[in-house]
Image (cartoon, helix red, strand yellow):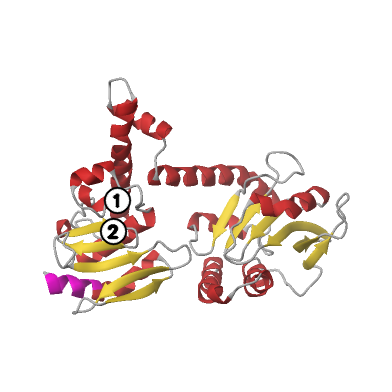
């Protein structure tokens, strides 16, 4: 297998076993050690390559241990601190990494819960671990653009200079992408003012900000719809594929009426994943009906895809609100829903026949 396939296999292992992992020790045995071995390529049973429970006296802290130290030529190159699977990773629980980073030759530190790996270096100050990671690998949602950089950390391709040189760019690109995602989900005042000033010539008062805040949010969602639509058309390989229109304005809210949607339901958050999943379902359904007939409605518990914006004509439901698992709900002739777990959004295509069959029943 090539490196991307090895990484995908590791991701599938995490998906299959994560519900059975309840302790930090189980996380290390089931996820972290296999990651070090199969993904990074180091022999976890060779103390010349991987030292578990690595100890170094740090000031008044005597006998503290870091979970793993990865060695090259007798020198510590990477430090790894592990937390329990499903436990959130915060810089506050990386205090040992901070201390060990300063007293060893390591230039790379990794904080992980077996599912997410945060990679740190010392861009801001020499020999002092940065507060923010330069690379974040989420095995449940792998960013393909990071794979070449991750490969530089493997035993066979280890290139410290290249890693450090790329770290600055990776760090800020990652932060910018996460910031953009946050603004697309819930634009703040500065973001709203930025776009409002480009389309509105008057003074931007509080009333104007209140008026434009939902409009900016709606425009960004429709822009993302358009971008996803272009991806789908490219993936389907058809330049004359019928244009998939952006979602109707009332579809963003579970209440339906356009006026309600303009003001928005603050308790319902439509995510980028839900919009992309909707566009995949829509692209599949368009083989049976015109794209304008496929609608969406978001609610607190699920994201519905409907024919003719009619609750009595459900095509599918996207259950994406859980942080751990995602499901697609499909309907039989009696409109009974069955949920199927999704490892990734691409797996929606596995249910194309069921989606088309649902559309044909109503059409």
Nearer-N-terminus badge (2/1):
1
Left or right, 222 with respect to 88, comes to left
In the displayed structure, 180 sits above or below 292; it is above
Left or right, 63 with respect to 95, comes to right
Is 357 inside the magenta-drawn segment?
A: yes
201 vs 251, nearest the viewer: 251
Q: Main secondary structure of the magenta part?
A: helix
- The image quadrant of residue 301 is bottom left
The answer to whether residue 1 of the structure is visible from this angle is no
76 vs 102, nearest the viewer: 102
Quarter in which the N terminus is drawn = bottom right
| Residue at left offset 36%, top offset 75% | 340
Please state the extent of the stretch shown in magenta in the rendering.
355-362
Q: Are marks 2 and 1 in contact (CB under 8 Å)?
A: yes
Q: Residues within 10 Å of mark 2 (few under 14, many from 20)?
A: many
Quarter in which the C terminus is drawn = bottom left
Q: Which mark is residue 225?
A: 1
Give how far across and how far down residue 130 sits, in percent.
68, 44
Label 1, secondary structure: give it: helix
- The image quadrant of residue 243 is bottom left
Give how far across and how far down residue 205 sits, in percent.
33, 23
Q: How many marks?
A: 2
| Residue at left offset 67%, top offset 70% | 28
| Mark pair 2, 1: CA separation | 7 Å
Left or right, 50 with respect to 323, comes to right
Q: Which residue is mark 2?
A: 279
Give how far across and how far down residue 283 sits, in percent.
24, 62
Give how far across and how far down residue 247 sits, in percent.
23, 52
| Residue at left offset 14%, top offset 74% | 361
Q: Residues within 10 Å of mark 1 (few under 14, many from 20)?
A: many
């Amino acid at each position: 297998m090539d490196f991307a396939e090895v990484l995908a296999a590791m991701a599938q292992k995490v998906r299959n076993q994560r519900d059975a992992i309840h302790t930090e020790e189980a996380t290390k045995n089931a996820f972290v050690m296999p990651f070090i071995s199969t993904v990074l390529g180091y022999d976890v049973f060779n103390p010349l390559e991987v030292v578990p429970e690595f100890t170094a006296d740090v000031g008044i802290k005597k006998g503290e241990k870091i979970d793993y130290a990865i060695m090259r030529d007798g020198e510590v190159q990477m430090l790894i601190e592990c937390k329990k699977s499903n436990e959130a990773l915060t810089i506050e629980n990386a205090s040992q990494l901070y201390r060990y980073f300063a007293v060893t030759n390591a230039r790379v530190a990794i904080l992980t819960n077996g599912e997410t790996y945060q990679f740190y270096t010392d861009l801001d100050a020499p020999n002092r671990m940065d507060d923010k990671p330069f690379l974040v690998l989420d095995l449940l949602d792998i960013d393909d653009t990071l794979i070449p950089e991750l490969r530089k950390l493997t035993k066979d391709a280890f290139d410290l200079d290249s890693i450090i040189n790329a770290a600055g760019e990776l760090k800020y690109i990652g932060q910018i992408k996460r910031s953009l995602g946050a603004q697309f989900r819930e634009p703040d005042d500065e973001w709203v003012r930025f776009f409002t000033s480009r389309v509105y010539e008057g003074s931007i008062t509080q009333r104007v900000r209140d008026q434009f805040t939902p409009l900016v949010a709606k425009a960004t969602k429709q822009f993302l719809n358009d971008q996803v639509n272009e991806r789908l058309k490219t993936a389907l390989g058809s330049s004359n594929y019928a244009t998939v229109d952006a979602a109707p304005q009332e579809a963003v809210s579970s209440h339906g009426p356009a006026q309600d949607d303009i003001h928005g339901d603050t308790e319902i958050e439509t995510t980028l994943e839900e919009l992309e999943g909707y566009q995949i379902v829509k692209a599949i359904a368009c083989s049976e009906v015109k794209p304008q007939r496929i609608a969406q409605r978001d609610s607190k518990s699920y994201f519905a895809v409907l024919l003719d914006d009619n609750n009595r004509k459900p095509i599918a439901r996207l259950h994406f609100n859980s942080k751990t698992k995602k499901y697609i709900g499909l309907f039989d002739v009696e409109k009974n829903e069955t949920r199927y777990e999704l490892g990734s959004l691409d797996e929606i295509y596995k249910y194309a026949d069921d989606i088309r069959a649902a559309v044909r029943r109503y059409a």
